[in-house]
Image (cartoon, grey):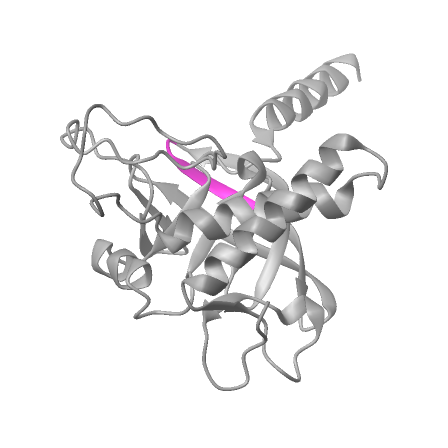
């Protein structure tokens, strides 16, 4: 009997050690190819196929948002993911297999997705921003011609807005940090609106709102 209990404890301990509640990939946007990432930055696509935030604890597909429940290692770089989701106003559970192929490439149930945010090792001179959003401006390395400042990609603005929105809605009304997050959220919304991006469409419920290229029926800030 003692042998059985010892073996059971070992199995349970091993299972727990191999499980976590965060995706083992960087926060940011993921699309089926680098070309799709570029098309989204240029406004030719109005959706993100897969996005991760909150340090891997939250992810979104176009029609659902999910909080990660468990991530269990199955074998090297392969994980079983279980999550609790909101889709169409209903709670549901979602499961999928995640393969981590590298810093820029993952597979979800076999479908390959490319990170739109992580810089590849060979792109040392490109110095693009890494995934996690930041509100601090990057200093220029020297004088540049007037009008040469590169516009912030909408993917980054949207991620920053999502973080600020979560901090604003989840904070206390009299907390200075909450007020700061709400002000940042509004400022980012104005920047996105100026770039012809809208949040939600007429006839949608709040949970259905997504940032998209403004068009017929779009709600303006």
From this viewpoint, which residue is outermost toward the front? 146
Tell me the residue at 78%/39% (across/down).
Answer: 171
Image-based side of 27 in relation to 168, left or right: left
Horizontal arrangement in the rendering, residue 121 relative to residue 201 (left or right): left
Relative to residue 172, is residue 204 drawn left or right? left
Can residue 125 be seen here? yes
Q: Is 77 part of what is drawn in magenta?
A: yes
Which of the 4 image quarters holds residue 109?
bottom left
Q: Main SS of the magenta segment?
A: strand
Q: Is residue 12 above or below residue 64?
A: above
The residue positioned 55% from the left and 68% from the top of the image is 63
Residue 65 image-quadrant placement: bottom right
Give the image location of residue 146, x and y in percent.
20, 43
Residue at the image position 51 percent from the left and 69 percent from the top: 198
Whether residue 83 sits left or right of residue 132 in the image: it is right
Residue 145: x and y in percent read 16, 40
**Quarter of the figure with residue 118:** top left
């Amino acid at each position: 009997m003692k042998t059985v209990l010892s073996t059971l404890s070992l199995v349970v301990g091993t299972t727990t050690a191999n499980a976590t509640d965060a995706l083992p990939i960087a926060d940011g946007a993921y699309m089926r190819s680098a070309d799709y990432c570029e098309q989204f930055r240029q406004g030719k696509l109005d959706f993100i196929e897969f996005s991760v935030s909150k340090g891997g604890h939250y992810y979104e597909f176009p029609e659902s948002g999910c909080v990660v429940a468990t991530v269990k290692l199955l074998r090297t770089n392969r994980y079983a993911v279980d999550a609790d989701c909101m889709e169409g106003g209903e709670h549901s559970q979602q499961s999928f297999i995640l393969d981590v192929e590298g810093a820029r490439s993952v597979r979800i149930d076999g479908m390959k997705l490319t990170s739109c945010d992580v810089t590849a090792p060979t792109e040392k001179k490109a110095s693009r921003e890494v995934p996690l959003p930041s509100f601090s401006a990057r200093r220029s390395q020297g004088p540049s011609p007037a009008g040469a400042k590169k516009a912030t990609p909408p993917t980054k603005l949207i991620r920053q807005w999502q973080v600020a929105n979560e901090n604003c809605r989840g904070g206390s009304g009299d907390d200075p940090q909450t007020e700061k997050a709400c002000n940042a959220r509004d400022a980012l919304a104005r920047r996105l609106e100026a770039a012809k991006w809208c949040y939600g469409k007429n006839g949608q419920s709040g949970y259905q709102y997504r940032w998209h290229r403004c068009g017929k029926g779009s709600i303006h800030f």
